[in-house]
Image: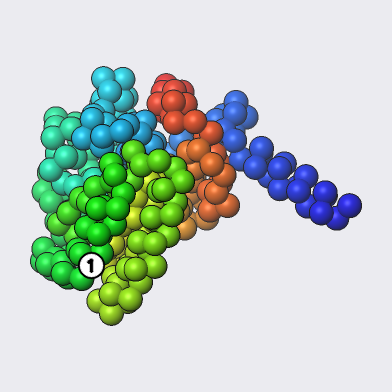
């Protein structure tokens, strides 16, 4: 009986977190009453659906128009806090008055200028490269992405059973060299990323909050890396998880396709 009550309570909590009319009304009330707003947006899986090839996940016209409306309101500071690199963010959102955090906080852009939280471009250890390359050789349709501040193994197009096996094997193989080199292994949505532990999406939020005070703060994302953002918000902040339930977020939007309509309703 106790187990049933516990499960029932959990189910109720999960259901209550879903953004429906009542929750949207409350968030919108806080938004409308605020004079200074910080809006933190993940990209892949949040503003844009996942696709087979990450290079094809270009922003839709609907999204670009939404971002233009959001940034036209001078009460809003809108930041795309993404794992994407600087070059892609600049290319895709050219002409829109956005700020960015690239590669999970390794770089940030304010007032049209990029700044870095890493001292220099990382030279990757041969052992780590060999481990990832060996995994790719054994895993058809997987690939490695070398960024300025991180290495990423992508396996979105790999058969599910093989992907799960190889992901566990790769993480186990990387633990030794990653520990020796003081690097962090971050499992994400169909990726495994190797990076410095000195920055993440949450450290970028803390940097922003340290510079200004905001009446309204909202962060939205779909991945485990976005939970760093949620944890960095003050108690009155609005955190929204897209997709599966997360105890780190106050609210949940179950499907990615509902994200743009949510913001359209929020700002109208």
Seen in the picture, residue 4 relative to 262 is either above or below; the reply is below
The colour scheme applied to this rendered structure is rainbow
Tally of numbered discs: 1
Position of residue 98 measured from the top left corner of the image (x, y, whole percent):
22, 38
Seen in the picture, residue 178 relative to 21 is either above or below; the reply is below
Rendered residue at 34%/68% (across/down):
173
Q: Decide which of 7, 205 is in the foreground and name it.
A: 7
The quarter in which the C terminus is drawn is top left
Residue 261: image quadrant is: top left
Q: Decide which of 205, 164 is in the foreground and name it.
A: 164
Position of residue 117 measured from the top left corner of the image (x, y, whole percent):
19, 63
Rendered residue at 89%/52% (across/down):
1
Q: Is residue 122 visible?
A: yes
Find disc 1 in the rendering and name its residue. Answer: 128
Q: Can residue 101 be seen in this view?
A: no
Seen in the picture, residue 16 relative to 179 is either above or below; the reply is above
Position of residue 114 measured from the top left corner of the image (x, y, whole percent):
13, 51
Q: Decide which of 125, 85 is in the foreground and name it.
A: 125
Furthest residue to the front? 138
Furthest residue to the right? 1
Pointer 1 local density, CA inside 10 Å: few below 14, some 14–19, many at least 20: some
Rendered residue at 25%/59% (across/down):
134
Rendered residue at 22%/58% (across/down):
133
Residue 220: image quadrant is: top left
Position of residue 212 measured from the top left corner of the image (x, y, whole percent):
31, 54
Residue 73: image quadrant is: top left
Q: Decide which of 179, 200 is in the foreground and name it.
A: 179
Q: In this view, does 81 lie to the left or right of 187?
A: left
Q: Is mark 1 on a helix, strand or loop?
A: helix
Seen in the picture, residue 105 relative to 257 is either above or below; the reply is below
């Amino acid at each position: 009986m106790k187990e049933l009550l516990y499960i029932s309570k959990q189910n109720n909590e999960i259901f209550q977190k879903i953004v429906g009319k009542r929750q949207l009304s409350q968030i919108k009330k806080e938004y409308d009453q605020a004079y200074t707003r910080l809006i933190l947006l993940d990209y892949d899986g949040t503003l844009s659906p996942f696709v087979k090839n990450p290079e094809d996940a270009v922003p839709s016209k609907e999204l670009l128009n939404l971002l233009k409306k959001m940034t036209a309101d001078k009460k809003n500071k809108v930041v795309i806090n993404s794992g994407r690199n600087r070059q892609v963010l600049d290319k895709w959102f050219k002409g829109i008055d956005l700020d960015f955090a690239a590669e999970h906080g390794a770089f940030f852009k304010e007032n049209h200028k990029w700044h870095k939280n890493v001292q220099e471009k990382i030279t990757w250890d041969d052992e780590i490269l060999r481990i990832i390359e060996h995994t790719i050789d054994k895993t058809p349709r997987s690939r490695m992405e070398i960024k300025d501040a991180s290495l990423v193994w992508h396996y979105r197009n790999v058969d599910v059973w093989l992907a799960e096996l190889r992901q566990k094997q790769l993480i186990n193989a990387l633990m030794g060299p990653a520990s020796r080199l003081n690097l962090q292994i971050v499992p994400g949505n169909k990726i495994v990323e190797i990076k410095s532990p000195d920055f993440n999406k949450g450290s970028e939020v803390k940097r922003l909050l340290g510079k200004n005070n905001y009446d309204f703060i909202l962060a939205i994302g779909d991945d485990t890396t976005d939970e760093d953002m949620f944890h960095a918000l003050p108690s009155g902040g609005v955190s929204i998880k897209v997709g599966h339930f997360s105890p780190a977020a106050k609210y949940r939007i179950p499907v990615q396709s509902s994200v743009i309509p949510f913001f359209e309703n929020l700002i109208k």
